[in-house]
Image (spheres, grey):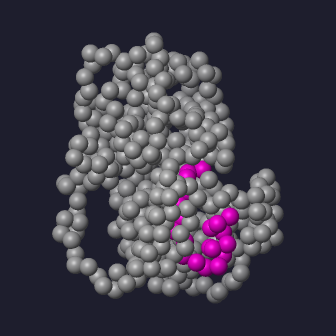
Amino acid sequence: MKFTELGLNESLLKAVKEQGYTEPTPIQAKAIPLVIEGKDVLAAAQTGTGKTAGFTLPLLERLSQSKPPMKKKQIRVLVLTPTRELAAQVADSIATYGKYMSYRSMVIFGGVGINPQFAAIKKGVDIVIATPGRLLDIASQDGIDFSAVETLVLDEADRMLDMGFIHDIKKLMAMMPKHKQTLLFSATFSKEIKTLAAGLLKDPVLVEVARENSTAGKISQVVYPVDKSRKRELLAQLIKTNDWKQVLVFTRTKHGANKVCKQLEEYSGIKAAAIHGNKSQGARTKALADFKEGRVQVLVATDIAARGIDIDQLPHVVNFELPNVPEDYVHRIGRTGRAGMAGEAVSLVCIDEHDLLKAIERFTKSSIKKVDLEAFRPDPSIEAEPIQNGRGGGKRGGGQRNGNRNGNGGRSNSRNKKPSKNKPANAKPENDRTPTEKKKKPRNPHAEKIGSNLQAKLDKLDKKSSRRR
């Protein structure tokens, strides 16, 4: 299939061609026609498969088909993302493909002044790309009018759920028209995502181009067992021995990212930069730009800050520390192997993280190759320690706040504790549950009726997935 067969106008096709694309990815081929038709869509695809263009291209096409009169502060399209970086990535996609069209778009997130955002909305905007917290702040001050919203997009919906944005999203949706198009895009397709979709989407079309919770097929994965105290040394050796020019390294905490970055530069002479929620927006943007341009060899990031990092040919991803939540592993390694390119994902695993590794392998339904390096063989006398506050055996904190309203995102410290044997790795601690969650509300018959059609489709999808496995 060619882009010319998807129903896009000549202006969009010209912009697509300039980017060197002639054939859509599977998620684009399936989603674009549905979005243009005005259907609600629930789409799941591996990170790096082109799902951003899968909704930005048809949204721009729909905008070109009509130009209704707009009142002050009204918008036509709203795209919600969990982080600043992802919002910026979506905005870049819209700017790239809409360069030959007449429209106005803007990005709204925290960490920058709010007054210029108020002013830009007043001038008139067609498309708003925003993080939920800052947008809700603006809406609460009557700074934006959602009454004319035609399409709502929830991008990286799984991450927004994980970050506690669900309540903000529901408040925002209450301000929007009931009759609108809603698109939900996610890298993983969990039960929580399906539950969210049942409440937000109307008779959606399900689009899934990869096996549920799978990792991209062109990413080679390897685990190196190593003592926690020697991880930095092994990382430096891998980078130098293999002559890696561009490496994205993941840590669990902001403090850990700073520490790894400092150690690589001071002890190994490797140019590195850190990106996380405590960094200013300017510092984060500069670090990412330096990494893309090759001025920095290693970018050390936390899970939240890494959302939105979009580098087509990023060759190497390293898990300096395994994530506490198995879904995050899929998102992390999905930064490489994008757009059909090959990639390599390396995990440095100490004895404290063996249970986390098992949880990841169960979640992805795969066994990851283990390679023992004689020079870094773990000391058998070392016993496992519980992973506290997001760091293996650490005494200091460093956990991120849950549901950060400025789009930095993060989890509470309680999410970072080592999971018990009786609970799944991604179980939510009792103390983190809100009173509403602890005391279940009676079922809403009307809501059940609305979601019945979706549930039937989900059941079919589950059966189809089971047959594929």
Q: Look at 42% across and 67% down and name the residue there.
A: 194
Say above or below: 329 vs 409.
above
In this picture, which residue range is highlighted in magenta?
29-48
Where is residue 119 drawn, in percent x and y?
A: 54, 70
Where is residue 313 drawn, in percent x and y?
A: 66, 40
Say above or below: 381 vs 400.
above
Asked if residue 354 lies left or right of residue 70, the reply is left
Say above or below: 173 vs 389.
below
Asked if residue 412 lies left or right of residue 197, the reply is left
Q: Residue furthest top?
A: 375
Say above or below: 343 vs 97.
above
Where is residue 104 drawn, in percent x and y?
A: 65, 70
Where is residue 128 drawn, in percent x and y?
A: 56, 69
User: How many marks can you see?
Assistant: 0
Q: Look at 44% across and 75% down and name the residue there.
A: 456
Residue 75 magenta-drawn?
no
**In front: 246, or 420?**
420
**Residue 317 visible within the image:** yes
Q: Quadrant of the N terminus?
A: bottom right
**In front: 224, or 48?**
224
Residue 44 magenta-drawn?
yes
**Residue 139 visible within the image:** no
Q: Look at 47% across and 58% down and name the residue there.
A: 466
Asked if residue 443 lies left or right of residue 23, the reply is left
Q: Look at 26% across and 43% down and name the residue there.
A: 419
* Quarter assignment of residue 229: top left
Asked if residue 439 lies left or right of residue 28, the reply is left
* Quarter assignment of residue 217: top right
**In front: 8, or 260?**
8
